[in-house]
Image: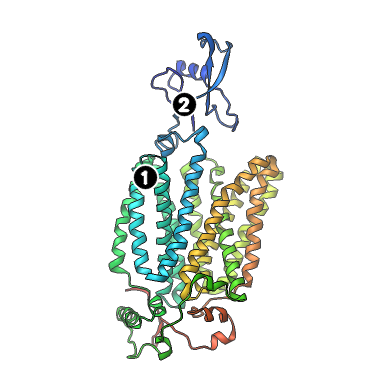
């Protein structure tokens, strides 16, 4: 929160210092903001008195736009917006900076996704880590708004590359029985990051030190180059069978499994076809499947981020509210771990989307008939919606990664992430639509959009084939046949070694 600085008043602060200070605030600062009547002060104007009559509130005066502000330290002691006064006429720049971050995420998802399919998962992950480290640390020293936005774009692109490529390499390093854990554990650490961020921000409350404390530890990630192997599936897709065999034999040695002398059949060692993202649109089956995946990614992201915008409506402490919004994701991911290998990907994703969507739609009744008296129930339903969208986010990562053929998996995941970013960009506009409409109906409209879109996406996902315990499709032709009896009869490449007594996957190196 902010207000205009009182003219000619040295050491003015947002907090009231004394009775005299309060009298000066009453004299110079309008007590209502024209854009938000819940605020104590007008944020952009002060009273300018004529003929030096400022001691009399009834004297002739007019509102004047201010050029200097004082800020409340109740939540944050320092932010970049405070530092360069991104308020009033420049307030839109904060939203623009957020949008540019998602533009970076979109560029990174698509560009680094295709780069990963071209040069390998390991190289792309390492490149993304270095870019993330440099840009996130450099952001703390951004000298002006333009530099801040440009660096934020780089941060968005690099974090997209780290998360997406890390997810894909994790899924490709394991067999069918371990893909669930490889996929969902990524999401659990995302929630851990939200909880840690709440703690760090509460303790430091200064954007410079928060940025540095969260960015400097990324230096450790450079060690991934020495620890992680290249994806054997990607190596095989490029015909590099000797390197793929070396990775698999090292995994077998660590897991205590004896591999046969001849690891691959002759047809597996043939150099496979190469493919690009556009190949997903060359057949009717893949086209419909891909569009459904894209739509689900967009809706999941829009709902997830849109509901996150309502965190402040919980009431109480800002940091506690943010913490709750992160904690609510843990039961979502626990349910995924518990049910994905029992119900299957399709049923879990559809159920999560329907749960979140119906919960959002039910807020129509609490808003229309309960108002503030049922605000707690509205918040609870919104958090159930957040739980559903978080669970769906976890499932759609695993589900779509298993549906895309290996030759275009990372590019497909990158394109899916682009659709998610579009949903994230749309989320604040949908949330703000209620303000434009006004009234109880306006309050309900955003949640109706989130809920209706979630229900529609969940129903459409029933058209996708189940991937539970299925071998991953390797080629475009495999992708077309995936889910059919003909596909199950084909000889498949498996990177899971069957021991005499139990199934041992590539779980550690």
SS at mark 1 in the image: helix
Determine whether, in the image, residue 201 is placed left or right of residue 28. Answer: left
What colouring does the structure picture have? rainbow
Cα distance in 3D space between marks 2 and 1: 28 Å
Determine whether, in the image, residue 358 is placed left or right of residue 310. Answer: right
Badge number at residue 210: 1
Say if residue 317 shows up in the picture: no
Badge number at residue 67: 2
Q: How many marks?
A: 2
x and y percent of residue 76 in the render?
A: 42, 37
Say if residue 224 shows up in the picture: yes
Q: Nearer the viewer, residue 14 or 245?
A: 245
Determine whether, in the image, residue 423 is placed left or right of residue 406. Answer: right
Mark 2 Cα-neighbour bin, 10 Å: few <14, some 14–19, many ≥20: few
Quarter of the image where the C terminus is located:
bottom left
Residue 227 sits in which quadrant?
bottom left
Cβ atoms at labels 2 and 1 below 8 Å apart: no
Q: Is residue 286 above or below residue 297?
A: below
Q: Residue at x 30, y 61 (%)?
A: 222
Q: Residue at x 34, y 87 (%)?
A: 259
x and y percent of residue 230 in the render?
A: 35, 73
Q: Nearer the viewer, residue 185 or 218?
A: 218
x and y percent of residue 92 in the render?
A: 52, 39
Q: Is residue 210 above or below residue 301?
A: above
SS at mark 2 in the image: loop
Residue 21 sits in which quadrant?
top left
Q: Residue at x 46, y 75 (%)?
A: 407
x and y percent of residue 6 in the render?
A: 46, 20
């Amino acid at each position: 929160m902010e207000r205009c600085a009182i003219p000619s008043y040295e050491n003015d602060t947002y907090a009231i210092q004394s009775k005299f200070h309060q009298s000066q605030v009453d004299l110079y600062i309008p007590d209502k903001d024209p854009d938000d009547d819940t605020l104590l002060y007008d944020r952009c104007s002060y009273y300018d008195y004529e003929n030096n009559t400022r001691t009399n509130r009834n004297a002739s005066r007019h509102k004047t736009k201010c050029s200097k502000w004082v800020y409340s330290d109740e939540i944050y002691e320092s932010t970049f917006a405070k530092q360069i006064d991104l308020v009033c006429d420049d307030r839109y720049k904060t939203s623009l900076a957020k949008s540019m971050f998602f533009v970076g995420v979109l560029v990174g998802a698509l560009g680094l996704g295709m780069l990963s399919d071209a040069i390998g998962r390991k190289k792309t992950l390492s490149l993304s880590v270095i870019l993330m480290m440099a840009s996130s640390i450099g952001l703390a020293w951004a000298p002006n708004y333009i530099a801040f936005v440009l660096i934020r774009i780089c941060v968005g692109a690099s974090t997209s590359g780290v998360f997406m490529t890390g997810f894909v390499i994790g899924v490709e390093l394991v067999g069918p029985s371990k893909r669930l854990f490889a996929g969902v554990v990524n999401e659990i650490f995302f929630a851990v990051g939200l909880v840690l961020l709440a703690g760090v921000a509460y303790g430091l409350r200064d954007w410079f030190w928060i940025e540095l404390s969260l960015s400097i530890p990324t230096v450790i990630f450079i060690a991934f180059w020495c620890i992680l192997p290249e994806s054997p599936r990607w190596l095989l897709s490029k015909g590099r069978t000797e390197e793929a065999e070396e990775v698999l034999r090292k995994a077998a040695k660590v897991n205590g499994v004896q591999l046969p002398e001849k690891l691959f059949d002759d047809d597996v060692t043939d150099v496979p076809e190469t493919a690009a993202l556009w190949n997903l649109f060359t057949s009717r089956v893949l086209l419909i499947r891909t569009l459904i995946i894209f739509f689900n990614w967009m809706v999941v992201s829009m709902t997830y981020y849109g509901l996150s915008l309502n965190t402040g409506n919980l009431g109480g402490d800002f940091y506690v509210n943010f913490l709750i919004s992160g904690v609510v994701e843990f039961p979502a991911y626990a349910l995924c771990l518990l049910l994905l290998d029992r119900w299957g990907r399709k049923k879990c994703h559809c159920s999560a989307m329907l749960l979140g969507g119906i919960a959002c739609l039910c807020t129509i009744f609490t808003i229309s008939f309960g108002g503030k008296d049922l605000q707690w129930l509205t918040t609870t339903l919104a958090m159930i919606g957040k739980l559903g969208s978080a669970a769906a986010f976890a499932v759609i990562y695993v589900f779509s990664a298993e549906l895309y053929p290996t030759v275009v998996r990372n590019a497909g995941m990158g394109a899916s992430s682009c659709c998610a970013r579009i949903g994230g960009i749309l989320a604040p506009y949908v949330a703000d639509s209620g303000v434009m409409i006004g009234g109880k109906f306006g309050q309900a409209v955003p949640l109706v959009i989130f809920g209706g879109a979630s229900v529609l996406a969940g129903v459409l996902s029933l058209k996708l084939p189940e991937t539970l315990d299925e071998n991953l499709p390797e080629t475009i032709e495999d992708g077309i046949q995936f889910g059919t009896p003909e596909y199950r009869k084909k000889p498949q490449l498996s990177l899971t070694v069957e021991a005499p007594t139990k199934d041992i996957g590539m779980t550690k190196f």
